[in-house]
Image: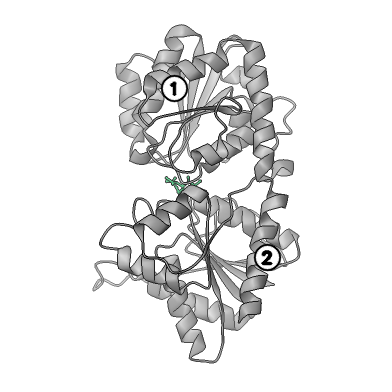
Amino acid sequence: MKIGIVCYPTFGGSGVVATELGLELSRRGHEIHFITYSQPVRLELLSNNVHFHEVHVPEYPLFHYQPYELALSSKLVDMVKLHGIQLLHVHYAIPHAYAAYMAQQMLLDEGILVPIVTTLHGTDITLVGSHPFYKPAVAFSINKSDAVTSVSESLKEDTLRLFNIKKDINVVPNFIDLDRHVNNFTDCQRAMMAEDHERIITHISNFREVKQIPDVIKIFYNIQKEIPAKLMMVGEGPEKEGAEIMVEELGISDKVIFFGNSNEIDRILCFSDLFLLPSQTESFGLAALEAMASGVPVISTNTGGLPEVNEDGFSGYLSDVNAVEDMTRNALQILRNSATLSTFKANAKVQSKKFDIHKVVPKYEAIYEETLNRL
Ligand code: GMT
């Protein structure tokens, strides 16, 4: 199949999932066209069947807001015609599903029928999309998609509760490429980060309010009072500066490293003992899955899709949002004893295998085929 993939190209779950999906589809013989405003961060190699088409939005002083949707839908029309793209798979409803629908209508006018598959990722539904300013447009573009998928059961339920949706929603969970992800490091240079007797705790996110960054720091603060430990904070976002100030005020600057965005996630996870994800909401929690695939147990909240990813008492523990004391207790339960830690590390790997790329990507292929056959 010739498939056009539209996504956000930045560091962030939906863009990572879209990119990894496109790359795996290309390995399975499909021709993939990424269409977005810059080259996706995990898309390092372009090849015969992986293409990238950049959407340009010319700056014009008259516009207070530059019309990205318009530029994207025009680019989709051009790329479908030029490359014979048969199907558009858009990740994140806003504004991608909307722009794809406009492209579909323009193409129909020329007698070309291109179906749209929309994948809902979470914040497009729970945090942003359900805002009254966007809600009618989001509901409309979901209902106009030819197939709709969500990354967890929980997100499907949220979508049906928040919007008047007439389409079936297929749950296709996020996935992990274990062959590529399982760290092949003989030495991930742990010694550069911590002493042998110290536990390494890691948090990776886009540092938005929803990630509850102050809770990450509070949990770590409690842990390091009990056992020797270091905290690795990976990512960039609006809450980062506040976190740096909090770390300073708590007097733990020598135990916390802020990395910023990193292309070395695998190496960081390779030397990590525990992953913290105390989010207020999380439709899936791809970062937790990546941690588990590297054998890192997860302390998370029990919100959204997290219970579908992290199995309580097996790959880690789940707690209520803001239950800092409970999350501290659970973290110490895993970290205090080396034998317990080894068991949880092994369990985390086992749990990640449920989301093996080779089990999940065929589900998308089946949806594409079914959608194309329905035309
Ligand atoms: O978590 C974010 O703020 C980024 C966001 C995104 O769109 O990239 O992540 C969402 O999609 C990911 C991939 O499906 C999920 O793993 C995240 O759980 C989800 N984030 C939230 O629901 C807050």
- Which tag, 1 or 2, sits closer to the chain's start? 1
Amino acid beneath label 1: Met
- Label 1: few (<14), some (14–19) or many (≥20) C-alpha neighbours in 10 Å: many
The residue carrying mark 2 is 366
Q: Secondary structure at mark 2?
A: helix
At horizontal 63% and vertical 66% (from top left) the residue drawn is 367
Judge whether 312 appears above or below 78 on screen.
above
At horizontal 41% and vertical 36% (from top left) the residue drawn is 279
Asked if labels 2 and 1 touch by Cβ distance under 8 angstroms, the answer is no
Q: Quadrant of the N terminus?
A: bottom right
Judge whether 27 appears above or below 246 on screen.
below
The reply to whether residue 25 is visible in this rendering is yes
Residue 151 in the image, given as x and y percentages of width and height:
53, 52
**Side of 128 where 296 appears, left or right:** right
Residue 206 in the image, given as x and y percentages of width and height:
43, 41
- Label 2: few (<14), some (14–19) or many (≥20) C-alpha neighbours in 10 Å: few
At horizontal 31% and vertical 23% (from top left) the residue drawn is 246
Q: Nearer the viewer, residue 288 or 51?
A: 288
Amino acid beneath label 2: Ala
Residue 330 in the image, given as x and y percentages of width and height:
49, 19
Query: Which image quarter: residue 250?
Result: top left
Residue 93 in the image, given as x and y percentages of width and height:
43, 62
Query: Which image quarter: residue 63?
Result: bottom left
The residue carrying mark 1 is 327
Name the residue at the bottom extreme.
110
Q: Secondary structure at mark 1?
A: helix
Q: CA distance from mark 1 to mark 2?
A: 40 Å
Judge whether 68 appears above or below 261 on screen.
below
Judge whether 359 appears above or below 258 on screen.
below
Q: Nearer the viewer, residue 327 or 216?
A: 327
At horizontal 41% and vertical 52% (from top left) the residue drawn is 158
